[in-house]
């Protein structure tokens, strides 16, 4: 599972690691252009957004508290700086976390990933 998660974090195909996973910013490809692995089975839904909010909140909240108590900046300056920081961190994390969740689903054969292998293994009858 770890290689699939790392490949997803890098926004690469969880199967081969060289094909791009996403088209655009957050749209997952239907299949990998390199290895033809079907990727349309994913069900990332709101998971990446929840994880992004969780991580950004846990990173930025202590920084905001430390920055305010240490430097006592003007509230408007502080709000501006940390708003830009929160948005930038969120934009950085969101596609990477989506790729990671797709990689986990692929590795665990969830939501239809690996269904062709399962059909091939079942006896006809």
Image: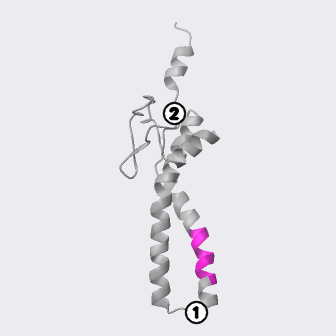
Kindly indicate whether the residue at mark 2 contacts the one at mark 1 (C-beta within 8 angstroms).
Answer: no
Magenta stretch: dominant SS?
helix
Looking at the image, is mark 1 or mark 2 earlier in the sequence?
2
**Of the two numbered discs 1 and 2 in the rendering, the one whose residue sits closer to the viewer:** 2
Give the image's coloring scheme.
one colour
20 up-or-down from 47: above or below: above
In the image, the segment drawn in magenta is 57-66
The residue singled out by tag 2 in the image is 16
Q: In terms of secondary structure, where does tag 1 sit?
A: loop
Residue at x 52%, y 45% (from the top left corner): 8
In the rendered image, the vertical position of residue 17 relative to residue 77, given as above or below: above
Question: In the rendered view, does 76 fall on the left or right side of 69?
Answer: left
Q: Position of residue 75 (x, y in %)?
A: 49, 90
**Residue matched to label 1:** 72
**Image quadrant where residue 28 sits:** top left
| Furthest-left residue in this view | 24
């Amino acid at each position: 599972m770890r290689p699939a998660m790392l490949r997803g974090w890098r926004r690469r195909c969880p199967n081969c690691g060289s094909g791009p996973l996403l088209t655009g910013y957050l749209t997952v490809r239907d299949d990998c252009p390199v290895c033809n692995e079907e990727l349309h089975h994913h069900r990332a839904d709101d998971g990446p957004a929840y994880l992004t909010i969780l991580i950004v909140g846990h990173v930025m909240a202590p920084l905001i508290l430390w920055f305010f108590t240490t430097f006592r900046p003007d509230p408007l300056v502080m709000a501006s700086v940390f708003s830009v920081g929160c948005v930038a961190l969120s934009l950085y994390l969101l596609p990477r976390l989506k790729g990671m969740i797709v990689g986990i689903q692929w590795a665990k054969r969830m939501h239809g990933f690996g269904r062709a292998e399962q059909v091939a293994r079942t006896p006809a009858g």
